[in-house]
Image (cartoon, helix red, strand yellow):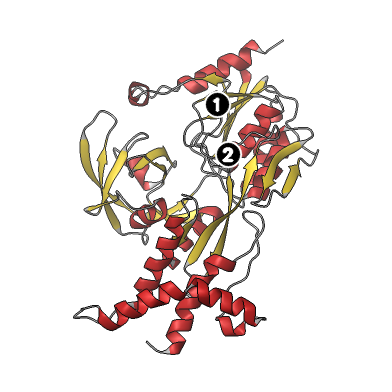
């Protein structure tokens, strides 16, 4: 390997030690250049010392490892980065290939190519279907919420992180993907789905019986603020007696978007508190310009409600603006920034943790609903929604 290649790999590796940023969704940072371009010799010497053992091991492999094919230095560098990330013990700090990074960017922009499901990772390391996106290819198959995805195109996904597993399901429009799934009843089935461009609905709204308004937010993406406000105006124009805000299966999104949306429901005060590893904190407050700050409110949550969804639900709960109904939430209370590397791969790095207005930690704990209601496999089969039914009953009990 020549010196240029070594410095390129060094730049890729050192970035883990030196990247800085602020706030999820709109953070800034810097990429790392080889040590000889750093402003001080002391900094260069420190970084060279930090990587000394790595380079010793690298040189031994390059000089002595038996291989009938040339070594793939890029794969070796990627493996080293994944090993460093794994050593941090943070499930939210991950390395993404260029393709995987593009997938997450497409999610936050509200449109992507795939089959049209939202998923969580199970404790056993498989993907579990949380929701089917209306009108997407998956909705036309036997796939349903609660199903476990075991294999993609004959390859087990166990042991992969969520980004890697999802990237196997994604693909160009018109191509097919074969899934081995396990239904909640225990039966396994292999299904083939033709991929399509899937537009995430972001918001779903309608009037329910008993003059109750219903607003579902699928994701805190770039379009969410405007769509939520537009839907609220339409619903409130019908003078409903109460509002159900459905955050089930919502995986989160941009931080500044959740603060904007929380402002629609909470009249004043803090939405969340952010703290970095030095104890420095930032408080994010509502704008005071919301249009749904008085209507009786019930918020639906489940184990698929994560990150930004937990910020909103926790703020509503702490301000006693409404009640949470459903199941304990996912428990992701940390802020990530995604930094692109020179080859368009990326690091998604945890830079802060956030807390509810009452200073409650969410990371690894989640939110406990005020009214706990589960959904069974039998409920899924019968297309019953006891959580929504309980929310309606609660709002009716609040009517004057």
Q: Which residue is mark 2?
A: 309
90 shown above or below 60: above
Residue nearest the viewer, comparing 42 with 273: 42
**Residue at the location (66% across, 36% down)?**
356
The furthest residue to the bottom: 2
**Residue at the location (52% across, 40% down)?**
250
What percent of the width, then of the height, locates residue 122?
37, 40
What percent of the width, then of the height, locates residue 393?
56, 14
**Residue at the location (65% across, 39% down)?**
355
For the N terminus, the quadrant is: bottom left
61 shown above or below 161: below
What percent of the width, then of the height, locates residue 348?
52, 58
30 shown above or below 222: below
What percent of the width, then of the height, locates residue 48?
52, 77
Q: Is residue 219 left or right of residue 271?
A: left
Q: Which residue is mark 1?
A: 368
Q: Can residue 342 be seen from the camera position used here? A: no
């Amino acid at each position: 390997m020549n010196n240029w290649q070594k410095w390129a790999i060094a730049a890729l590796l050192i970035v883990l030690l030196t990247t800085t940023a602020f706030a999820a969704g709109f953070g800034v940072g810097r990429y790392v250049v080889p040590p000889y371009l750093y402003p001080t010799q002391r900094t260069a010497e420190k970084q060279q010392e930090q990587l000394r053992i790595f380079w010793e091991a690298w040189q031994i492999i390059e000089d002595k490892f038996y291989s009938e094919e040339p070594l793939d230095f890029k794969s070796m560098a990627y493996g080293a980065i994944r090993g460093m990330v794994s050593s941090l013990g943070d499930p939210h700090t991950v390395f993404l290939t260029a393709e995987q990074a593009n997938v997450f960017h497409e999610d936050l922009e509200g449109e992507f190519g795939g089959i049209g499901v939202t998923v969580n990772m199970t404790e056993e390391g498989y993907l579990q279907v949380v929701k089917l996106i209306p009108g997407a290819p998956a909705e036309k198959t036997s796939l349903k919420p609660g199903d476990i995805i075991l294999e993609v195109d004959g390859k087990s996904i166990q042991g992969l992180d969520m980004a890697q597993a999802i990237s196997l399901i994604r693909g160009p429009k018109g191509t097919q993907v074969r899934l081995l799934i396990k239904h909640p009843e225990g039966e396994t089935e292999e299904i083939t789905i033709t991929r399509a461009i899937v537009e995430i609905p972001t918001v779903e709204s309608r009037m329910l019986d008993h003059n109750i308004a219903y607003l579902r937010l699928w994701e805190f993406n770039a379009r969410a603020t405007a769509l939520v406000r537009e839907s609220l105006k339409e619903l409130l124009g019908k003078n409903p007696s109460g509002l159900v805000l459905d955050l089930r299966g919502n995986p989160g999104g941009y931080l500044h978007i959740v603060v904007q949306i929380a402002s629609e429901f909470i009249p004043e005060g803090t939405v969340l508190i952010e703290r970095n590893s030095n104890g420095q904190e930032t408080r994010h407050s509502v704008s005071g310009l919301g249009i749904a700050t008085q209507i009786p409110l019930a918020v639906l949550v489940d184990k698929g409600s994560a990150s930004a969804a937990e910020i909103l639900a926790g703020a509503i709960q702490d301000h006693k603006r409404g009640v949470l109904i459903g199941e304990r939430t996912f428990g992701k209370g940390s802020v990530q920034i995604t930094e692109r590397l020179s080859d368009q791969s990326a690091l998604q790095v945890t830079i802060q943790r956030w807390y509810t207005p009452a200073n409650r930690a969410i990371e690894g704990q989640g939110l406990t609903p005020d009214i706990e209601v589960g959904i069974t496999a039998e409920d899924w089969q019968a297309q019953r929604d006891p959580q929504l039914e309980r929310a309606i009953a609660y709002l009716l009990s609040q009517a004057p």
